[in-house]
Amino acid sequence: MKIFKFFLILIFNVNLYCVELSKTLTDHGVAVPFSTHRGIVATKGENGQNVVCVWLYDHRGCYGLLYINIDTGKSETFDIPFNREGEAPYASILSSKNRFYSHFGSYFVEFDPEKKSYTFFKKTYPKMAMSMTEDDNGNIWSVTYPDSGLVSYNPKTGEFFDYGSLKKENWAQYPRYIAFDDKNWVYVGIGYTRSNIIAFNPQTKQIKYMLEENERQQGGASLFRATDGKVYGLPFSGKKDNWYEFYNGEKKKIGLLPSEIKQKIYISGSQGLFHRVFPDGKIIKNLDLTERILIIEELKTKEEIKIKFDYRTEGAHIMGITVSPDETICGGTAFPFYFFKYDPKTDNWTRYPCYGQWNTIDTGDRKVFVGGYTGGFLLEYDPFLPWKGTIKNDENSNPKYITESSPDINRPHDLLPYDNGKILILAGTPDYGYTGGGLLFWNRETKTKTLIKHTDILPFHSTMSIIPLKNNRILCGTTTLPGTGGEKKVNLAELYIMDVNTKKVIWHSPVLEGVENYNDLFYDEEKKLVYGFADQKIFFVFDPEEKKIIFKYDTYKDFGPSVSAQGSKIFVPAPEKELYILFRNLIAKLDRENFKIIPIVKVPNISNGGGYLDGKIYFISSSHLYSFMIPK
């Protein structure tokens, strides 16, 4: 038992050094040992001193609050006092009484900067606040994703009210706006499948829907509290001459917003909240969680004060990896967005801030290609040239920005460098509130872009996996998932074959019953068969010529779920025509003659797949990079 306990401690110990777990399994450490913030406020702390409060986020979600006293130079991390379920703040507010609030992991939480402690937290209707405000009586309000759950907290009395959902939909709602009028009505602006504005009276519990059905559009409604005590809002934020005035639970259309209407300011915002000004006028000029340096500027003299601080972290979540043409392992993280490169020969790491979130990553033509979020962008990285970062329309960038594909693709799920990278094919789910993802084709020789919409592939499906077949064809597997906050409109995923030259679907079929996702595919050129995984549990063999399933096996009972991520790499090919399969807690080998799955080794939690290099399979476990040496 002691040996097993020591093994687990080694597996999950976070450090930057190589930890030998066994003769075959190696933990190469944390790829990017930094956290990111989910809300920053400059305020007054203990003894009236200037302090900075930062919600800290790493691969575990929001795990603590960083507290930096700029007068003493000391920093502390206060662990979140509840199970946050891997979630993080999407909204925060610093109240008029100097309390810092957020709402995530289905908990409402209050932190008192002057007492240096969490002074209230409460379990709520799920899940996380998308907006927060303070009413004229000092009560704190939040409204949550995914069902517009409304709560309030009275800091004076400690009273807490959970009003539940204001309106349920068959899609996840993003209530990004909340405001009170001076008649004590609260208004909530919602997106993205169909915009909405809801009014609620806390005294009577009356709910009123302020928009007619024909006013609700794809996108988000927005609103704000004005200094005149009223609330002003737009049913659809893209149209600027359609303003409404909301007051005492009633609405009045006013067209263009009068210039004299001014917004009442609260220290509140999304996960990007950054309130820089201290009560005495000093300003946060920079807060760098990577270098762990805080720079404060004096208001009058412009003198800078530099403070070195520290905090605990288990590192950023690794989105994906690939074996680079320079025989290193490279990939990207979120959050923060960082590129990393690990050199197995020297055991050295290289890290740079990168452009966006690298959901999918693959290689071809001695280059590394990236498909990322948001916007479904494409990048091209030359690992043999110096890193320069990415700037749009700058040909000297490395990685070089190529193009993007929003709204048809927002979150990429697969990237295929077709014909050794001559054509890049990107697939994924669409923008917020949309249903049905497209396919992006980028011809690197002609530098031309072709974007195929879901309506010309399979309506309301998104493509999850792609592999090349012979005769200029590709085989793709779909998902029924909509874009984030979108409405699911189909129930059964399909396989389809597309002609790369014509971009036309020449065959499609729901070949497996009850399947919602075709997670990954692999083409066996010798046997001319396709191996695949669906819903993380159904291994199948598909004959692309006969267009039928010839073998299937539910692997869940014996092996657990396969890995799954945005850009899953379940199958890892190796020399001698060997093919390995990555399950969440197991590496297995496929016998291609009889389709038998042979367990090889139990491993720590594998969060995403990887690749083969020099006798080892590299894979991801949250923030760590691991390798498994294949037994000879």
Image (cartoon, helix red, strand yellow):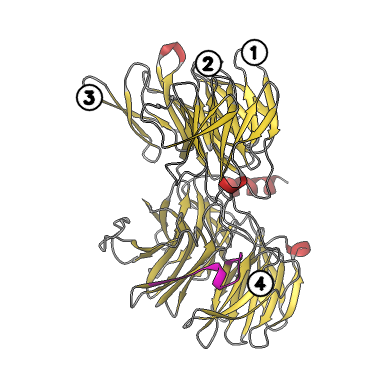
Query: Which badge, 4 or 1, is on the more N-terminal residue?
Result: 1
Q: Is residue 97 visible?
A: yes
Identify the mark at residue 302; answer none if there is no mark: 3
Element on which disc 1 rests: loop
The magenta stretch spans which residues?
Answer: 449-463
| Residue 278 sits above or below residue 527 on the image | above
Give me the C-alpha separation between circle 4 and circle 3.
62 Å
| Residue 127 sits above or below residue 68 on the image | below
For label 4, the residue is: 494
| Residue 52 sits above or below residue 288 on the image | above
Q: Nearer the viewer, mark 4 or mark 3?
A: 4
Amino acid at pointer 2: Lys
For label 1, the residue is: 157
Give me the C-alpha separation between circle 2 and circle 4.
57 Å
Amino acid at pointer 3: Lys
Query: Which badge, 4 or 3, is on the more N-terminal residue?
Result: 3
Give me the C-alpha separation between circle 2 and circle 3.
30 Å
The reply to whether the C-beta atoms of the residues labelled 2 and 4 are less than 8 Å apart is: no
Give me the C-alpha separation between circle 1 and circle 3.
42 Å
Residue 388: image x %, image y %?
A: 29, 57
| Horizontal side, residue 341 vs residue 538: left or right | left
The reply to whether the C-beta atoms of the residues labelled 4 and 1 are less than 8 Å apart is: no
Residue 353: image x %, image y %?
A: 37, 50
Q: Nearer the viewer, mark 1 or mark 3?
A: 1
Question: Label 1 neighbourhood size at 10 Å, few (<14), some (14-19), many (20+)?
Answer: few
Q: Residue at x 67, y 36 (%)?
A: 166
For label 2, the residue is: 115
Element on which disc 3 rests: loop
